[in-house]
Amino acid sequence: MSALAPQAALSKGTLTVIEHKGAVHVQHSPKRCPPFLSMAQERGSSMRTNAATLDAPTTSSPSSTLPTEAARRTAFREDFTPELAEPVEATVEGKVPTWIHGSFIRNGPGTFQGMKHLFDGYAMLAKFAFENGTVKVSHRFVETEAYKAFRETGKMQFPEFGTQVPALKTLWLTFLGMTGLGKGFTDNSSVNVVPTPDGKQLISMTESVAGTYRVDLDLNTLGQLEFRDGVKGLLTTAHPTLLPDGSMINLTSGFGSHYTVFRQNRATNVREAIAQVPLRSPPTPSWIHDFPVTENYAVVPETPIFFNLKAAVFGGAEYLMFDWKPEKRSVLHLVNLKTGSVTQFDAPPYFTFHYINSFETADGSALCFDFSKFEDPEFLNGLLLDNLRGNKRPIAPSPLVRVTVPLDGSSSTATLQPLLKDNSYTFCELPRVNPHYKGKEYRYAYAVSAKLPASFGNALAKFNVKEGTVIQWHEAGCIPVEPLMVPRPGAQEEDDGVVLSVVTGANGNSFLLILDATSFEEVARAKLPHGIPYGFHGTFVHAD
Ligand SMILES: [Fe+2]
């Protein structure tokens, strides 16, 4: 199923689509009508009707852009994925470049048994080991307290993102956490994984500090990281920015008075506070899943999505455990990483999960950060498993935008503008860039995208943010995960390398997809005889 010669060139209004068997190249013309509606109308769909159930293929034979039933059964699996501790060699189609030498390791749920939301599943690490053109696969659960308690009792003992446990139990856990007598929230370490500086171990992460675990490269859980460094806060992000000196920048928050931006030594795991940022609505923090970091600054983005503690215990908020208050706009706290000084900027309200990249302009007058902008957090509700398993909701549009924060004292307002020349591109999530360009001015981003009609991310995209162009890879009936860009050793060009993604195929089995990061065409795929559930984030650990 490698990318073949173009089969057809379609022109629908101002949208030009060049269709390949395995890839779709999309080129936008300027001055289009509002993106989501126009594309939906071109296809005769009512994409904004939340109550509608989209047409879904029910067999493993894909008949539309929607994921097949078999793919959805794998991606949003209810029973437990059997562990694969002993690596198994995958069947390779195409030719895996031999310069890819190391391990692609991803984090994500291994089961959703008894759970309601995509973000609830118990953490399972999946490893794809590359050596001499071969790929070996293994996957194991992270032995967290939450997972072990479920395994032993058959019931959830800790609340997860979208699934509550009895309220008294949650209140007791919260009390223990806030008084320092216990860990507090769940330690289900299911979101991200980063390597130690020597590449010999991994740190598995989620949004609770308690969910930070050490794991070895054979995916053995080594233990929970214990912090005794005085940095307070039960909540954190699973999106630290890794620095070349072996440290990383992250933040903590909690129900109190401030966020703490800190630097963590990834070898010793000692954290050092850089700045304390006041909450604008204490004691309730905004939900911060990710945040921009450049060489000299971090931005703590207080967007108008606030935790609702009552809803976290009892449910009932409009968006899971969150309140959405767009009238409060966004406050951006600019933290100077060298001095710890904090400056506030006003910005329009927005909702996002991830920041694509951020950088300081060459003249030092501004800091820019890019992301895909949702109008509201409705996409969170769309990720309820019932919606995903039934293809019940059209995917929410999230066009790419750029926020510019003045650094020259000229204004206390940050501006938000469309990132692409033609902002008609409808969906972007789980973005990655060449790791050598993280925090720097850049040209290329890779992300999960959507070929409409879509209920979920069903394609991959390469964005050229300077030219405003998009190339898309799509295969009918599939569900791809976050694309990771691995640069070729010694590469001179930003997009010289490969893009790795794990795809749940239309037949329910998974395959590791290798795309050329320049052309975005398929180089090879390594096929598994079984499926791996949907996952979130990953890393590549180079071999010696
Ligand atoms: Fe994330």
Image (cartoon, rainbow, N blue to C red):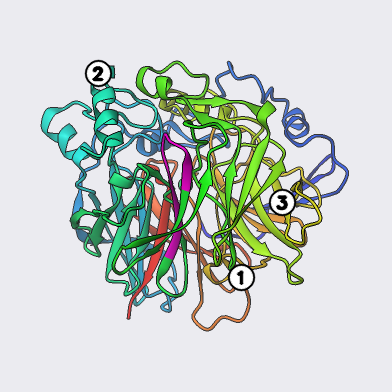
The CA distance from mark 2 to mark 3 is 43 Å
Looking at the image, tell me whether mark 1 or mark 3 is earlier in sequence order.
3
Q: Which mark is residue 402?
A: 3
Mark 3, secondary structure of its residue: strand
Q: Three-letter amino acid code at disc 1?
A: Asp
- Between 414 and 151, the one nearer to me in the picture: 414
Q: Residue furthest left?
A: 152
Residue 324: percent from left, percent from top: 58, 26
Q: Three-letter amino acid code at disc 2?
A: Leu
Mark 2 or mark 1, whichever is nearer to me: 2
**Which residue lies under the disc numbered 1?**
495
Question: At 60% across and 32% down in the image, what residue appears?
Answer: 304
- The image quarter containing residue 346 is top right
**Is 460 one of the magenta-colored residues?**
no
Looking at the image, tell me whether mark 2 or mark 1 is earlier in sequence order.
2
Q: Residues within 10 Å of mark 2 (few under 14, many from 20)?
A: few
**Which residue lies under the disc numbered 2?**
168
- The image quarter containing residue 240 is bottom left
- Between 117 and 458, the one nearer to me in the picture: 117
Question: At 51% across and 42% down in the image, what residue appears?
Answer: 288
Quick check: 267 above or below 144?
below
Is the magenta region chiefly helix, strand or loop?
Answer: strand
